[in-house]
Image (cartoon, helix red, strand yellow):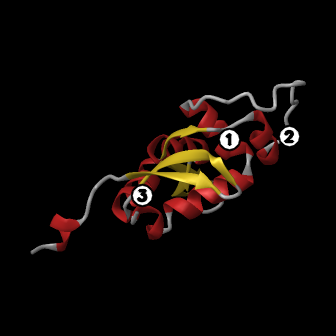
């Protein structure tokens, strides 16, 4: 029996956001190998003028977009009221319960603008217990 034959390449799980059991995010497992490839694919070369050497630099925007596209599969239950805990928003009167649909663009925006959500996603994705259920 080979270890590599037992390990799954992909697995998704639905995880409730801490303190908001109705807000559930579907997250995908990313192996170390795949994460390393993702980081490598998001690097670009840049000339260091002082050393006259080419250095590799992570393209933060490309990495964020690629990471979110790979890791956040979907969500349900994100309301304007919950969103207001992540980023400042104008809550329309009576619109606190309005649900915000999942889209990759919405997910990228939320990860980019909310340190709390970004930290939570990274914590869950990097915790093997998330995917043992």
Q: Position of residue 128 (x, y in %)?
A: 44, 68
Q: Say which quadrant the C terminus sits in.
A: bottom left
Residue bearing the label numbered 2: 88
Q: Earlier in the sequence, mark 3 or mark 1?
A: 3
Q: Position of residue 89 (x, y in %)?
A: 85, 35
Q: Are marks 3 and 2 in contact (CB under 8 Å)?
A: no
> Looking at the image, is 11 positioned above or below residue 23?
below
- At a point 75% along the width and 40% down the height, the residue shown is 83
Q: Say which quadrant the N terminus sits in.
A: bottom left
Which is more foreground, mark 3 or mark 2? 2
Task: Give the SS element for disc 3.
Answer: helix
Q: Position of residue 47 (x, y in %)?
A: 57, 51
Q: Are marks 2 and 1 in contact (CB under 8 Å)?
A: no
Other residues around mark 2 within 10 Å, as few (<14) / some (14–19) / many (≥20): few
Q: Is residue 63 visible?
A: no
In front here: 14 or 37?
14
- At a point 40% along the width and 56% down the height, the residue shown is 30
Task: Give the SS element for disc 1.
Answer: helix
- At a point 58% along the width and 37% down the height, the residue shown is 76
Gap in angstroms between the C-alphas marked 2 and 1: 11 Å
Residue bearing the label numbered 3: 35
Residue bearing the label numbered 1: 110
Q: Earlier in the sequence, mark 2 or mark 1?
A: 2
Gap in angstroms between the C-alphas marked 3 and 2: 31 Å
Other residues around mark 1 within 10 Å, as few (<14) / some (14–19) / many (≥20): some
Q: Are marks 3 and 1 in contact (CB under 8 Å)?
A: no
């Amino acid at each position: 029996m080979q270890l590599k034959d037992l390990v799954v390449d992909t697995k998704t799980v639905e995880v409730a956001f801490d303190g908001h059991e109705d807000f559930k995010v579907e997250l995908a497992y990313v192996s170390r190998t795949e994460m390393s490839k993702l980081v490598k694919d998001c690097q670009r070369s840049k000339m260091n003028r002082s050393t006259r050497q080419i250095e590799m630099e992570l393209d933060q925007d490309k990495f964020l977009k690629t990471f979110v596209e790979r890791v956040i599969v979907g969500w349900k239950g994100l309301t304007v009221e919950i969103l207001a805990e992540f980023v400042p928003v104008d809550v329309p009167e009576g619109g606190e319960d309005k649900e915000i649909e999942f889209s990759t663009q919405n997910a990228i925006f939320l990860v980019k603008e909310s340190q709390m959500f970004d930290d939570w996603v990274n914590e869950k994705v990097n915790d093997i217990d998330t995917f043992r259920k």
